[in-house]
Amino acid sequence: MKEQDVVEMLRHYRHDWLNDLQLILGYAQLGKLDKIQSKITDIIDRSNQERGLDRLNIPKTFVWLYQLNWRSDSFELQFQSLMDQQTVIIDDDALLSNIQKIFQILPSYQKEYQQYNGTLIFKELNHTLHIHLTFDLDWNDLSALKQELQSLPFIKAVKEEKLLRIEWQE
């Protein structure tokens, strides 16, 4: 990673923290204890998500995912690692490549001015890393999107239930 990338990442991270602290201060000045508690809970949850992702030992993927959240006007991801311990060896380069392939397809089907909040879930089953990426169903030509995603060789399933769910294994 280049020094400038690190500086940019730290700048965004600091900006987010300062926004959170300013909100907490504003709520404190207004005497809104319930809002303070809610915001602090959100910060703790986000920090736990980051810690879970960090424990997977996927630095390239970790950085790319965080940069996606800062650089994209359309996509914002939350992360969940449902792995207690790192018992699966993850190929960081392959994982990053697969995630990037998905995000090369998604913009072609997004609706104008639509914000897509997704969840990227990592879990271990039988010593294999299973990954689920979910979004809401509000896409242009959802059936064509599903078909194009299913054409990626690593994708195991694309489901349309209450959410668009993309599943694969690493």
Image (tube, grey):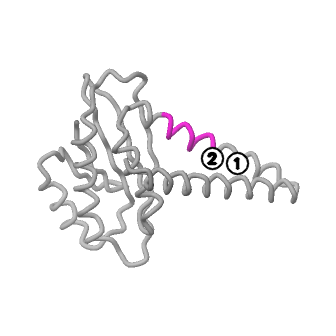
Residue carrying label 1: 38
Tell me the tag on residue 170: none
- Cα distance between the residues tagged 1 and 2: 6 Å
Task: Choose between 123 and 51: the one closer to the eye.
Answer: 51
Q: How many marks do you count on the picture?
A: 2
> Which region is colored magenta?
43-51
Q: Is residue 47 magenta?
A: yes
- The x, y position of residue 31, in whole percent, is 88, 55
Q: Is residue 58 above or below residue 73?
A: above
Image quadrant of residue 110?
bottom left
Along the viewing direction, whichever of 89 and 3 lies nearer the viewer: 3
The disc placed on residue 42 is 2
User: Dot 2: what SS?
Assistant: helix
- Residue furthest toward the bottom? 112
Instruction: Please indicate, yes or no, whether residue 77 appears anywhere in the rendered image.
Output: no
Q: Is residue 28 left or right of residue 68?
A: right
- Outermost residue, front direction? 3
Q: Residues within 10 Å of mark 1 (few under 14, many from 20)?
A: few
Helix or strand or loop: what does disc 1 sit on? helix
**Residue displayed at 43% across by 30% down:** 55
> What's the residue at 28%, 56% (across, down)?
160
> Looking at numbered disc 1 in the image, what kind of residue is underneath it?
Ser
Q: Name the foreground residue: 119 vs 75.
A: 75
Residue occupying image coordinates x 26% and y 23%: 127
